[in-house]
């Protein structure tokens, strides 16, 4: 992985040694600049989990990623910068997903910081509307605009539970204490990135964790959540859609030609029409 190119991509300079300040600035820049997204799976299925290739695509602004990719590359970067990084099997709970700890989510814990070398921190860039900054691996709450989060011991596994803010798109996330290697996520990555029924293939989405808000694009619906309000809008033209991807989500997709952009636009608009049809049927 080209570490210096990735640091330039997210706008962070290399620090001399691991510290909480350096880790926080790097995590915040990473989630602000590299989108959580499933755009990459709309025109073709995913390929095997390859963090070197993912890092190359992030640097080239061809893709962002989801948890395996984003946290995998973040883990590589932190390791290169001198942090001690561990990967953990997790599972996310939403209104449509029970939250089984089945390796459908990858979580990082980090230690080796100058202030307290033995203290662990949770670093997770792969929740979409999750953490902006690392939080200590201990029972307690954290406010990260616009959300309130709570970390406690898990009731589902020997590990931890992150309870999310009720306004967020997810309810919570559980992860195991035991560290694992990247191989533990290969099968789930194949399933989620290649199965046509996977939510990552059925709906084109992108998330960006801004300093004071969360902005989400699902098919052609844009939603931004602030502490005091939620702004919603529909993207009605392909020009606006690709401009938002490039300007707001830092995802200009330079590898897409005109035909591919047209195909992607038709796909996301169809997803929106299908959503409207289901909503009308349910209300009728």
Image (tube, rainbow, N blue to C red):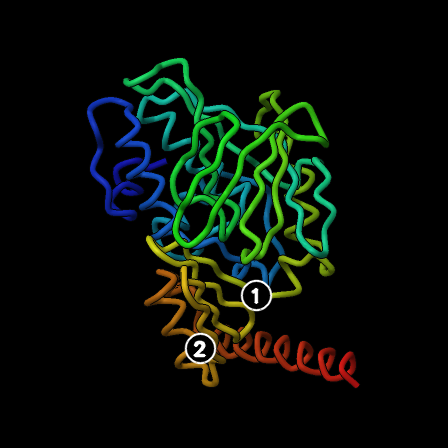
Q: Which is more N-terminal, label 1 or label 2?
A: 1
Position of the N terminus, as image quadrant, is top left
Dot 2: element: helix
Q: Compute the Cα span from label 2 to label 1.
A: 18 Å
Q: Quadrant of residue 117?
A: top left
* Residue 177 position (above or below residue 196): above
Name the residue: 55% across, 46% down.
164
Disc 1 crowd, CA 10 A, few/some/many (<14, 14-19, 20+): many
Question: Could you tell me if the residues under marks 2 and 1 are in contact, i.e. CB atoms within 8 Å?
Answer: no
| Left or right, residue 212 beside residue 12 | right
Q: Relative to the observer, which residue lies in front, 136 or 19? A: 136
Q: Relative to the observer, which residue lies in front, 258 or 149? A: 149
Name the residue: 67% across, 58% down.
199
- Where's residue 215, x and y in %? 43, 63
Dot 1: element: loop
Name the residue: 49% across, 80% down.
234
Position of the C terminus, as image quadrant, is bottom right
């Amino acid at each position: 992985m080209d570490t210096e190119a990735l640091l330039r991509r997210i706008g962070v300079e290399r620090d001399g040694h691991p510290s909480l300040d350096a880790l926080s600035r790097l995590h915040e820049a990473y989630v602000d600049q590299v989108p959580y997204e499933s755009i990459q799976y709309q025109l073709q299925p995913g390929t095997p989990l390859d963090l070197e290739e993912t890092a190359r695509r992030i640097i080239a602004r061809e893709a962002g990623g989801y948890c395996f990719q984003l946290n995998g590359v973040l883990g590589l970067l932190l390791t290169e910068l001198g942090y001690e990084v561990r990967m953990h099997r997790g599972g996310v709970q939403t209104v449509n997903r029970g939250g089984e700890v089945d390796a459908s989510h990858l979580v990082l814990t980090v230690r080796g910081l100058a202030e307290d070398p033995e203290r662990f921190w949770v670093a997770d860039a792969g929740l979409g509307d999750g953490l902006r900054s690392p939080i200590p691996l201990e029972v307690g709450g954290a406010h990260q605009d616009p959300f309130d989060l709570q970390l406690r011991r898990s009731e589902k596994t020997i590990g931890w539970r992150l309870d999310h803010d009720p306004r967020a798109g997810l309810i919570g996330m559980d992860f195991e204490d035991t560290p694992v290697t990247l191989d533990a996520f290969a099968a789930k990555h194949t399933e989620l990135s290649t199965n046509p029924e996977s939510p990552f293939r059925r709906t084109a989405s992108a998330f960006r964790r801004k300093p004071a808000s969360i902005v989400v694009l699902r098919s052609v619906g844009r939603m931004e959540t602030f502490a005091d309000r939620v702004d919603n809008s529909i993207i009605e033209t392909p020009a606006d859609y690709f401009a938002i991807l490039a300007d707001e989500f830092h995802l200009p997709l330079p590898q897409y030609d005109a035909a591919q952009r047209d195909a992607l636009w038709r796909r996301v608009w169809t997803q929106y029409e299908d959503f409207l049809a289901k909503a009308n049927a349910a209300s009728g």
